[in-house]
Image: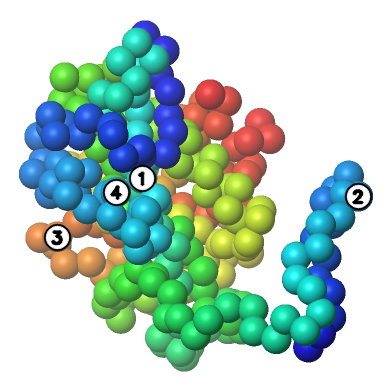
């Protein structure tokens, strides 16, 4: 505790975010988050997709979408 | 008509919005603003015509979610990182029925995927997930979403899009 925390941008600009003696950064909150219900088979399928060594190639529609 | 996509604002005209699906209409009218501004659980982006910049032509909602590592069946965790799996939920996407077939949906999903990439670049995320109505699975598939197996046959189809695929599209 008591250290400075500096944010440095790619251009080198620095902003001091926190100052010495600031001991608590955030209050004890439970942050909201979205809960998704999964079936066992969905989790298996998700794990297989997310752990694939290589991702699928983009479709033509996706390529067009990213050119917008 | 020039379409602008931006964050939902408090005084946007949402009461007349009708995409033909009551839950999607109701979410925009009753919950989108509160979820965005009061409890920060999801952000909605609206498509508007620059000539009538308060009238919502379509919208999508993004939220963050994660799957705890311990939730995965043990034999499937080997290829996953040793942490909870972060993901972006494309929670809603709808187009006002009077503007269906005019490219608004394409513009919306384009922006949603661009935001997804920015989130992944800034804070780290592996994939985008959505629950698609069965009759819309083909539409999402065109953009590279693949079905996640195991959903109930009568409900929506959960779908997955690897953000590496989106990033690859950006480089083409």
Label 2 marks a residue whose chain is A
Q: Residue at x 19, y 56 (%)?
A: B156
Q: Where is residue A4 in the image (x, y as percent from the top left)?
A: 84, 74
Label 2 packing within 10 angstroms: few (<14), some (14-19), many (20+): few
Kindly state the secondary structure of the residue where label 4 is placed.
helix
| Disc assigned to residue B6 | none
Q: Nearer the viewer, mark 2 or mark 1?
A: 2
The Cα atoms of the two marked residues, 4 and 1, are separated by 8 Å
Residue B105's quadrant in the figure?
A: top left
Alpha carbon separation for disc pair 4 and 3: 26 Å
Q: Position of residue B8 (x, y in %)?
A: 36, 39
Q: Is mark 3 on a helix, strand or loop?
A: loop
Label 4 neighbourhood size at 10 Å, few (<14), some (14-19), many (20+)? many
Residue B104 visible at all = no
Check the picture and name the quadrant holding the N terminus of chain B: top left
Q: Which residue is drawn at 28% across and 34% down?
A: B11
**What chain does mark 4 sit on?**
B
Camera-near label (4 vs 3) is 4
């Amino acid at each position: 505790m008591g250290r400075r925390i500096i944010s440095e941008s790619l251009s080198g600009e620095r902003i001091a975010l926190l100052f010495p003696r600031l001991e608590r950064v955030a209050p004890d909150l439970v942050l909201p988050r979205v809960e998704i219900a999964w079936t066992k088979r969905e989790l298996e399928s998700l794990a297989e997709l997310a752990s694939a060594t290589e991702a699928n190639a983009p479709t033509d529609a996706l390529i067009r979408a990213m050119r917008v | 008509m020039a379409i602008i996509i931006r964050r939902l604002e408090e005084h946007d005209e949402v009461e007349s919005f009708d995409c033909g699906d009551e839950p999607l209409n109701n979410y925009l009218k009753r919950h989108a603003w509160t979820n965005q501004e009061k409890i920060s659980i999801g952000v909605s982006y609206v498509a508007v015509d620059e000539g009538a910049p308060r009238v919502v032509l379509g919208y999508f909602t993004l939220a963050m979610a994660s799957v705890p590592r311990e939730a995965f069946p043990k034999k499937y965790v080997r290829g996953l990182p040793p942490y909870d799996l972060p993901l972006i939920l494309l929670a809603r996407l709808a187009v006002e029925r009077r503007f269906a077939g005019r490219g608004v949906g394409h513009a919306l999903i384009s922006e949603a995927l661009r935001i997804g990439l920015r989130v992944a670049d800034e804070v780290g995320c592996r994939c985008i997930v959505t629950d698609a109505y069965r009759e819309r699975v083909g539409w999402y598939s065109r953009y590279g979403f693949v079905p996640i197996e195991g959903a109930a046959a009568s409900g929506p189809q959960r779908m997955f899009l690897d953000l590496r695929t989106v990033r690859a599209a950006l480089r083409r």
